[in-house]
Amino acid sequence: MRDLIGSTLGHYGIIEQIGAGGMGVVYRAHDGRLGRDVAIKVLPEEAAQDPDRLARFEREARALAALNHPNIATVFGFETVGHAPAVTFLVMELLEGEPLRRRLPAGGVGWEKAVEIGVAVADGLAAAHTKGIVHRDLKPENIFLTGDGRVKILDFGLAQVKEPVQEDAETAHLTPAGTIPGTIMGTVGYMAPEQVKGLPADARSDIFALGCVLYEMLAGQQVFRRSSTAETFVAILKEEPPSLSMAGVAAPAELERTVRRCLEKSAEARFQSASDLAYNLKSTTTGQVLPVPPEQQKTRSIAVLPLQNLTGDPDQAYLVDGLHEELISTFAQISAFEKVIARTSVMGFKDSGTPIREIGRQLDVASVLEGSVRRSGDTVRATLQLIDASSENHLWANSFERDVTDILALQCDVAREVAGEIELALTPEEAGRLAAVPAVNPEAQEAYLKGAYHWRKLTPDGIDAAERHFELAIEKDPSFVPAHVGLVWVWGGRAQFGMVSPAECGSKMKAAALQAIALDDSSAEAHEALALVRTWTDWDWAGAEPEWRRALELNPNAAMSHAYYAHYLAIVGRSDEALPHSERALEIDPFNPLFRVLYAVVLLFQRRFDEARVAAQTTLDMQTDNLIALWVTQIVASRDGRDREAFEAANAWLYGMYGDQEAKEDVEQGWEQGGYAEAMIRIADNRASRFSASYASPVEMAYCYAEAGEDGRALDWIERGYEDRDPNMPYIHLSGYFESLHSDPRFQEMLRRMDLPLRKSPA
């Protein structure tokens, strides 16, 4: 390309070259008409003869001219001057500063700065996508940091533009004009999987690229870069990004989850818009930073994978599942383990074929235990092996053969050997518990395992079957503690499904929990069960706390105890203490939607409404019909004046609970006729009409009436909730919940009766 320095293009005097790339050379130039310096991007002479490259250059001009956003470089004009050969160039604002690439040290830029830059880029991309423009080549070289702290996206030379560009265009999903389908365009290491495959890119491809940039800003290294282009492409298509925490990056757990979602292989699994990504990034600025575990602690985390059933009999699934759950429980009660992943999160890897290294990365554990179970008559044989998750090296393997009556001894032997292999120190109490295995009635053990198997189905029929088996276990051995705890969960499940009134369920739960503790005061599960009863049935705040503390002392890795203890703390006005326990539950059981939504409720208590909304949406991404997540969504949306969103969440809750299409249509008609207030009245009336036929929560009806401005009817139903021991009553002083009633004397009196923290008005 000829040297243009010192020459004039129209009324632009070329001063110096300041950059170059595949789509052109950039110069500093002086605009003689307006007396200002500008940046001029000139298409190379050889490229000007290429119709495809020329068309892409013109598209860049049109794309940028259609945008006006503080995080996108401004375009002033597009011109062609001279003859034989003509010079085609783009005139842009001159930016003083340097590309992000030059600001990336080996150790990254720190998570706060990464979030700041990521939000600015996501905001700019959102503006571009709204105009129908997809960048397709986002990378650190194309993100510019000005001297006064602004962030600008550069170089839309590979931009995909909807033709024509319209002011109100939606994000384009079209192959750009002049591009041959199947052609790979972009920069190696930042292309989304669909780009690597030569498929059309869309807005979610830019989100993938921004995920790559975010990872690089945090870790100081490219996430998918390998020694060759081919290997990099394979990594993009098939490999998962390494864990940031295991790579030594201290950052909020939510931020790592955000980056991982950007980097999903499937476009459908990523954020569906850059504005959603920006919102998610902004929410991390108040999140808790999780420390990077010291090297010596990395071995103190384990995931016990679902065991293979080699019995040849599907009816023995209860035995295999039971042994799996009991192994997890046994490991969890060893305090030297920093983390033992709960059953819910490991079940997703059953028969998945996922490599051990990838399982370790997703669950953030150092070791994985896998194996199989075979039963022949009354003999059970378990073959187990411990694997280092990062190297996939086998650390330990052994086979255990026991009579079916010695299942407890088997799991204790495994726990002792694994603890010894990774040099975990057992406390005297733990060592004694693993050594002194009680004799178990085989018929009681088998009945209990079958009961637990049925309870995990979480259906009314499954609960009924579970009760029969737990009762049989107690008949065979009245001192068998797990069966008594099982009855607590049976009645808790019936209360949850509205099968029986809370008052009846609560009394039976309490009796079973007290019996379990009387039989074995060292049972963490029994103390957890009694803590639940004293919190949500007895409303005995003083009596509940010692039970929560004892449960966690006996089993520090109990995700359930951490999650619900967090709610107890929030209920009694100690919200700041609650959040660490809620986050701990997510660390132990990261893929459990229940603990995710319970975390959202804790955020509501702390009046962190935007974060609560994000946590609820994350839950709905995992479980689309999660009723608590819909409830949180309704509360936050209503508080923020987003009536349509609040209505849709409430109606989805109603249909999800009862499956009544007629009621759903009636509520929709109420919305059309009278807006949010009328829709809420119809939901409340619908639930009230069911009250005599099957139990429904009075507090839920009260909330809908309160949302409709029917304060008197709301207070009446709150009174009914108190009389019925509705387990939702401890939440009535929740931030964002019943706030219109907080100053009402009847409401204040109810809080005094329940000994709940008083609030005179919304903060």
Image: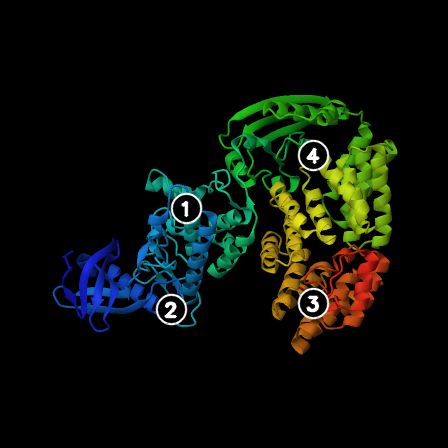
Q: Give the residue type at disc 1.
A: Glu
State left or right for residue 424 relative to residue 730. left
User: Where residue 348 sits: x, y (%)?
Assistant: 60, 42
Q: Which one is closest to the eye, mark 1 or mark 4?
A: 1
- Which residue is the site of mark 3? 664
Which of marks 3 and 2 precedes in the sequence? 2
Q: Which one is closest to the eye, mark 4 or mark 2?
A: 2
User: Where residue 502 sits: x, y (%)?
Assistant: 83, 53
Which of marks 2 and 1 precedes in the sequence? 2
Q: Secondary structure at mark 4?
A: helix
**Residue at point 80%, 68% (across, down):** 745
Tell me, for residue 216, which label it has, or none.
1
Vertical order, 40 against 398 (above or below): below
Q: Give the residue type at disc 2.
A: Asn
Q: Which one is closest to the eye, mark 4 or mark 3?
A: 4
- Which residue is the site of mark 2? 68
How many discs appear? 4
Tell me, for residue 329, which label it has, or none.
4
Position of the N terminus by quadrant:
bottom left
**Residue at point 66%, 45% (across, down):** 581
Inter-mark Cα distance, 1 to 4:
38 Å
Which of marks 3 and 4 precedes in the sequence? 4
Q: Give the residue type at disc 3.
A: Lys
Q: Could you say which is closer to the camera, residue 84 or residue 378? A: 84
Q: What is the quadrant of residue 164 in the picture?
A: bottom left
> Residue most toward the bottom?
673
Asked if residue 378 can be seen in this view, the reply is no
Q: Secondary structure at mark 1?
A: helix
Which of marks 3 and 1 precedes in the sequence? 1
